[in-house]
Image (tube, coloured by chain):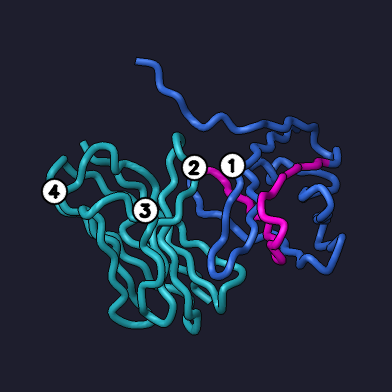
Chain colours: A blue, B cyan
Amino acid sequence: GESVGLHLPTLSVQEGDNSIINCAYSNSASDYFIWYKQESGKGPQFIIDIRSNMDKRQGQRVTVLLNKTVKHLSLQIAATQPGDSAVYFCAEAGYSTLTFGKGTMLLVSP
Amino acid sequence: DAGVIQSPRHEVTEMGQEVTLRCKPISGHDYLFWYRQTMMRGLELLIYFNNNVPIDDSGMPEDRFSAKMPNASFSTLKIQPSEPRDSAVYFCASSLGPDTQYFGPGTRLTVL
């Protein structure tokens, strides 16, 4: 029979382009957010985090933007490389746990 | 730092058999989480511990699943009896305080 799977949104970019991955979160009271990267066959890997008292935080080639008004997070990757190809998850922190989004698959072509 | 260690990395078993997955958290971390990831349902939290005590097991699918944390450096997730629908990748994660979680490499379970 036909199987119904989790259809991940996919972003396809060329090497060297900038990538923007978006995420909507659900709880307006959440005060801590994290982006994870999951490569094929591996566990999710921490990339960058941001607290709700900030609008923007920069890391190495990555920037996270937080818009609390519309409950929206974005991850910007500068000069995307083939090694950035992975599934990216945003997560919002509850009292002790994280709620993960469905994920976005990033495909980088050389 | 070795990170979170999980074993085995792959497990293939037959329906009805008992399966035990193992996890060693990062030293010093006081929270430990067990997740299951499938294409159908994504990443699901099964249970988490704080200071070796189970805090929330509402994500455990049924009584066939059980988890223990006998000490700060070891946890097990057991499925007995296993069923084909349990096939998934099981992740263990740990954190220092209820913030950033660090994941292990996962155990890919296939139940035939």
Marks 4 and 2 belong to one chain: yes
The image shows residue B94, relative to residue A14, as above or below, that is below
Q: Amino acid at mark 2?
A: Gly
Q: CA distance from mark 1 to mark 2?
A: 6 Å
Viewer can see residue A77? no
Magenta region includes residue B38: no
Instruction: Judge whether residue A23 is colored magenta.
Output: yes
Instruction: Inspect the image, locate mark 1, and give the three-letter code of the amino acid beneath it.
Output: Lys
Question: Are labels 3 and 2 assigned to the same chain?
Answer: yes
The residue where tag 2 is placed is: B42
Q: What residue is shown with label 1?
A: A102
- Assess disc 1: are there few (<14), some (14-19) or many (≥20) residues with their C-alpha within 10 Å of its C-alpha: some
Q: Residue furthest top?
A: A1
Work out how far the residue at label 4 is from the one at label 1, CA to CA, in angstroms. 31 Å
Instruction: State which quadrant residue B87 falls in.
Output: top left
Q: State which mark lies toward you, 4 or 1.
A: 1
Measure the alpha-carbon separation of dots 3 and 4: 16 Å
CA neighbours of label 2 inside 10 A, class few (<14), some (14 to 19), many (20+)? some
Q: Are marks 1 and 2 in contact (CB under 8 Å)?
A: yes
Chain of the residue under the numbered disc 1 shown in the image: A
SS under mark 4: loop
Q: Which residue is mark 4?
A: B17
Q: Chain of mark 2?
A: B
- Region of the chain picked out in magenta, as a range: A19-40
Q: Which residue is mark 3?
A: B107
What's the CA distance linking mark 3 and mark 2? 15 Å
